[in-house]
Image (tube, grey):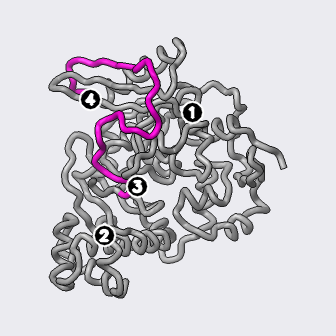
């Protein structure tokens, strides 16, 4: 069984995540290929698509949202994802066990629904949403009228996990924003979820976009457990490798495996990008950095800069009136060539992310940011899409 070194796994991930070069493909096709994009906050998917697609414009994704071709919904790992309408309906039933487990373990919300029959909560949620989309507060108030002794926010969270709900526009539309408002996926998309989805197809798609991957990797990515039997069933049609630690990796037969020395351009990834979250062993993108360098204690995943395919810095945009500044904070000093490449790509990002500004500036710090400490402005959403 061949062994794949860390750089080879890195290049495979970069290629399959559409980051080795910008691709000419519709945004909807990219979202489908990636099996969704984390979307706790409204703007990160726009940056994620800009980094991957040639000529991507804000209006393209905004139109997909308003036309209901893509939706924002709780899905993989019980976190908010931007997915195609087809994937929302096909994957939500399959991922329900992960959402059930999340609800039981959500310390802030679990007590509110403890002891209540899930189907009773589903019926109550459908009834509350029958008249149209509701904010979490409005949904909780409607449910609280029935269960007055329960926390309304916890009841709303329970329905969010038990029912396929989508966050409707203008939430998620660039430059518009708006409060989170929930509607049932069936009412918003005009058709019910698929009754019997296949886990085999889900695992195969994971390998195409994130492979080669171990059993633990696929389980980390999806939030599901007991997937070894699925991979064993698929084994005759897959190829296998080992990583440097000896873990067995599965892959689709035609998955690209670029050479470990393949040049990789500088790429800016937004907060919560799945590149950072979809493997049990994240060394293939973090290198020797600890997870705490990009994952904060309150569940925020920072915006990062890839240099030579690996995370080398974090970034943020600061707006002051009509001025926009991109602040890049490396974890270790960059070479002159690396610094120039980061500055050039950063200038392009700033023109996209702060298009309405009059002046632009890219600042790359000379020193090293301290892993595990906050050096950027606080974020406003945790990994599950809740405001924090």
Q: Which residue is mark 3?
A: 81
Name the main secondary structure of what is drawn in magenta. loop
Residue 263 image-quadrant placement:
top right
Sequence-earlier tag: 1 or 2: 2
Q: How far apart are labels 2 and 3 at the CA level?
A: 16 Å
Q: How far apart are labels 1 and 2 at the CA level?
A: 36 Å
Q: Which residue is mark 4?
A: 318
Q: Is residue 367 left or right of residue 354?
A: right
Q: Secondary structure at mark 4?
A: strand
Q: Which residue is mark 2?
A: 157
Pointers 2 and 4 in contact (C-beta within 8 Å) = no
Please provide percent x and percent y for residue 141: 16, 74
Q: How far apart are labels 4 and 3 at the CA level?
A: 25 Å
Position of residue 24 relative to residue 225, above or below, is above
Q: How far apart are labels 1 and 4 at the CA level?
A: 24 Å
Pointers 1 and 4 in contact (C-beta within 8 Å) = no
Kindly report which numbered mark, 1 or 3, lies closer to the viewer in this rendering: 1
Query: What residue sits 47% from the left and 61% below the top?
Result: 77
Q: Which residue is mark 1?
A: 310
Examine the structure image and report whether residue 75 is included in the region drawn in magenta: no
């Amino acid at each position: 069984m061949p062994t794949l070194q860390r750089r080879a796994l890195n290049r495979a991930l970069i290629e399959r995540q559409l980051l080795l070069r910008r691709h000419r493909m519709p945004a909807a096709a990219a979202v489908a290929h990636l099996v969704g994009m984390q979307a706790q906050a409204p703007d990160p998917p726009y940056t994620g698509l800009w980094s991957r697609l040639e000529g991507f414009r804000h209006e393209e994704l905004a139109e997909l949202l308003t036309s209901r071709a893509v939706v924002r919904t709780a899905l993989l790992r019980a976190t908010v994802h931007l997915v195609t309408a087809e994937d929302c309906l096909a994957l939500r039933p399959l991922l329900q066990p992960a959402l059930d487990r999340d609800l039981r373990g959500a310390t802030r919300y679990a007590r509110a629904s403890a002891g209540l029959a899930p189907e009773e909560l589903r019926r109550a949620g459908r009834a509350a949403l029958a008249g149209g989309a509701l904010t979490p507060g409005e949904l909780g108030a409607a449910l609280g009228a029935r269960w007055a002794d329960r926390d309304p926010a916890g009841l709303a969270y329970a329905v969010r996990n038990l029912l396929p709900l989508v966050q409707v526009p203008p939430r998620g539309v660039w430059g518009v924003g708006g409060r989170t408002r929930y509607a049932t996926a069936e009412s918003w998309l005009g058709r019910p979820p698929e009754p019997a989805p296949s886990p085999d197809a889900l695992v195969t798609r994971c390998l195409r976009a994130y492979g080669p991957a171990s059993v633990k990797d696929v389980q980390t990515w999806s939030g599901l457990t007991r997937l070894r039997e699925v991979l064993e069933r698929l084994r005759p049609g897959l190829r296998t490798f080992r990583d440097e630690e000896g873990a067995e990796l599965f892959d689709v037969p035609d998955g690209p495996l670029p050479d470990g020395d393949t040049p990789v351009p500088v790429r800016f990834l937004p907060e919560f990008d799945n590149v950072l979250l979809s493997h049990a062993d994240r060394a293939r993108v973090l290198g020797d950095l600890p997870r705490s360098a990009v994952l904060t204690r309150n569940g925020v995943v920072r915006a990062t800069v890839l240099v030579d395919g690996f995370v080398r810095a974090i970034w943020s945009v600061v707006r002051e009136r009509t001025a926009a500044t991109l602040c890049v904070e490396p974890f270790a000093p960059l070479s002159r060539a690396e610094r120039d490449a980061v500055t050039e790509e950063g200038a392009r990002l700033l023109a996209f992310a702060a298009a309405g500004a009059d002046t632009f500036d890219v600042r790359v710090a000379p020193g090293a940011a301290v892993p595990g400490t906050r050096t950027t402005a606080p974020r406003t959403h945790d990994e599950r899409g809740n405001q924090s």
